[in-house]
Amino acid sequence: MLRPALLGLASLLACDSASVAPPAAAPPAGASADAKPVPRDTSSRPGPEEHAPGDMPSKPPDPVQADSSAAPPVPPLTQYTWLTEAGGAPPAREQLAAAIAPPAGARRVPLATGSFGAWLRGLPLLPADAPVLLFNGETKPNQSAHHRVVDIDVGDRDLQQCADAVMRLRVEYQWAADQRRAIAFKLTDGTPWDFASYLGGTRLKLVGKKAERVPGSPRPATRETLRGYMRTLFTYAGTASIAAELPRRELAALTAGDVLVQGGFPGHAVLVLDIAEDDRGARYFLLGQSYMPAQQFHVLKNPGDPALSPWYRADALAAGAMTPEWGPFTDRDLRRFRDG
């Protein structure tokens, strides 16, 4: 296994905890190959402190009341296996599709049974008044960004930031769906990191700024092993790696399980949690995120349209949609996992 010091490494740059450096660009003609790269200027990248007070409503709108008759079937809570990791039955929890009604005049778009999007609709939620907590148990200073908090642990290290939370939910879905051999990502330097190899004993060794896979002793297929795999993944992958790895999608094909990602150092990623449509064909979507420092995953409010919040209009992505702590995201940022 990796030494604890290596597992604890995490970038302090916004929402990109990968500590393996990306491949270096070729030096300009005539430049020395040993010249150090110039750090990226991230001063213009929007962050939570750069939003004007008018970006958020002065008074939060009334919450959208759920219409239970419009809620589609969702997986049982036993499919969210972190809830039962300590043993026993899962706690009683509202699930996303039952707790958050579609926009007025719209209905949820049918999703394939067993798909990632259908699984996301069943995410368990904490009570409506629950605050977002940081990885260290402290209350997040900004409590105005979230609509609801998802009941999923964040760990006790500053690792599960934005892209990490997206990868965490994808891994948890594949684990629950018995797609464990499909659990695989690329690290920031392009090194493949798959769960099957990790089970077989593969570990990482850092050679300079490059991660190398080396053989080791096989590991048992347990939740503890899965968490070890994810800790390494969160340490050495991030927004830059998933932006490079996931294929682009057209806005017209937007669906639950898609990712809006701006890869970089810093960068940010949010996950499309649900999708709805009205009789005119207008589409709406919900977004979820973690952020920095690592914090509980939560459903985002829509600061640009409080009356519609927490839903967003899909066509807003053509010009750019602001989220409470990042933006704008556009349709150029839209990605999808390769098997949907």
Image (cartoon, rainbow, N blue to C red):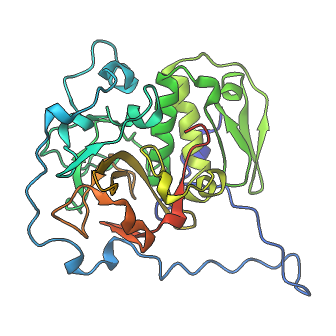
Residue 47 lies left or right of residue 279; in this view the side is: right
Among the 4 quarters of the image, the one containing residue 114 = top left
Q: Residue at x 71, y 24 (%)?
A: 201
Asked whether 302 or 141 is in front, the reply is 302
Q: Residue at x 24, y 58 (%)?
A: 301
Q: Position of residue 167 (x, y in %)?
A: 51, 43
Q: Residue at x 62, y 42 (%)?
A: 338
Asked whether 49 or 148 is in front, the reply is 148
Asked whether 254 or 325 is in front, the reply is 254
Q: Position of residue 254 (x, y in %)?
A: 46, 52
What is the quadrant of the C terminus in the image? Answer: top right
Q: Is residue 81 above or below residue 328?
A: above
Q: Residue at x 58, y 33 (%)?
A: 229
Q: Position of residue 70 (x, y in %)?
A: 20, 35
Instruction: Answer whether residue 16 is visible to the viewer in this image.
Output: no
Residue 292 lies left or right of residue 126; in this view the side is: right
Q: Position of residue 73 (x, y in %)?
A: 29, 26
Residue 63 lies left or right of residue 103; in this view the side is: left
What is the quadrant of the N terminus in the image? Answer: top right
